[in-house]
Amino acid sequence: DSGVTQTPKHLITATGQRVTLRCSPRSGDLSVYWYQQSLDQGLQFLIHYYNGEERAKGNILERFSAQQFPDLHSELNLSSLELGDSALYFCASSRGLLATGELFFGEGSRLTVL
Amino acid sequence: DAKTTQPPSMDCAEGRAANLPCNHSTISGNEYVYWYRQIHSQGPQYIIHGLKNNETNEMASLIITEDRKSSTLILPHATLRDTAVYYCIVRVAQTGYSTLTFGKGTMLLVSP
């Protein structure tokens, strides 16, 4: 158990819909990272928040957005969903700004878009 | 970050040592080598990291060549639960440097 909690674990929805994925980092961790893993793309970095502020963006689509709240939990919002958005979405956390390179990953949210 | 090259797959017999190679010939002096693994559809798990010296922890050993252009992750007594994709990542370790970039990794299959 990494201490990172993601909900929901599974989500099935239709094209054009909007969903929100939630992540609670380990106690005391200030950084939250979102990754997407699809069968053909591997693990892709989406976005990083540190203490409520966006720190880095990766391959995140404009239809996707995220935020980190004052209690440090984070949400990833996916809108106008397409079939290709079906993937595992992982949240990870670290104590600070990843100086040591150790990320703690949650178990992921599996999104299926039909 | 420097690019890494790993074999796509490897096999290992249960109880034997699993030696997973990684090539990072363009590594810079301030870049560390990290290893993570991902058991099927679970979140990736940190294993070990190092700069130039060999490192060992309760999970594995990391051997880095003297020229730092390659490294080997050693699981000394592989078990069936070690079947996973193993990722070798090279990254600058400094505050403010944001994330880890995962490649395709090596799929290690441990068989009875």
Image: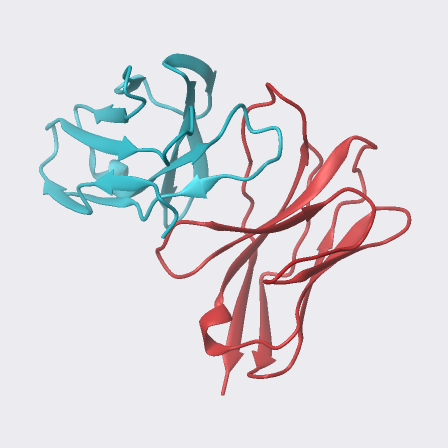
Residue occupying the point 26% across, 36% down: A85
Q: Position of residue A61 (x, y in %)?
A: 34, 22
For the question of whether residue A114 can be seen, the reply is: no
Q: Colour of chain A?
A: cyan
Horizontal placement of A75 versus A41: left or right? left
- The correct choice, above or below, for A19 with respect to A103 in the image is above
Q: Nearer the viewer, residue A113 or B85?
A: B85
The C terminus of chain A sits in image quarter: top left
Q: Position of residue B107 (x, y in %)?
A: 53, 64
Q: Nearer the viewer, residue A62 or A56?
A: A56
Residue occupying the point 36% across, 14% down: A52
- Give the farthest residue toward the top: A53
Q: Position of residue A110 (x, y in %)?
A: 24, 46
Horizontal placement of A30 versus B99: left or right? left
Colouring = by chain
- Give the farthest residue toward the bottom: B112
Residue occupying the point 51% across, 25% down: A96
Image mark count: 0
Residue occupying the point 35% across, 56% down: B41
Q: Quadrant of residue B4?
A: top right
- The correct choice, above or below, for B89 with respect to B63 in the image is above
Horizontal placement of B9 versus B84: left or right? right
- The correct choice, above or below, for B29 with respect to B34 in the image is above
- The correct choice, above or below, for B23 with respect to A63 in the image is below
Q: Nearer the viewer, residue B22 or A3?
A: A3
For the question of whether residue A57 can be seen, the reply is: yes
Q: Nearer the viewer, residue A29 or B68?
A: A29
Q: Quadrant of residue A101?
A: top right
According to the colouring, which chain is red?
B
Q: Quadrant of residue A42?
A: top left
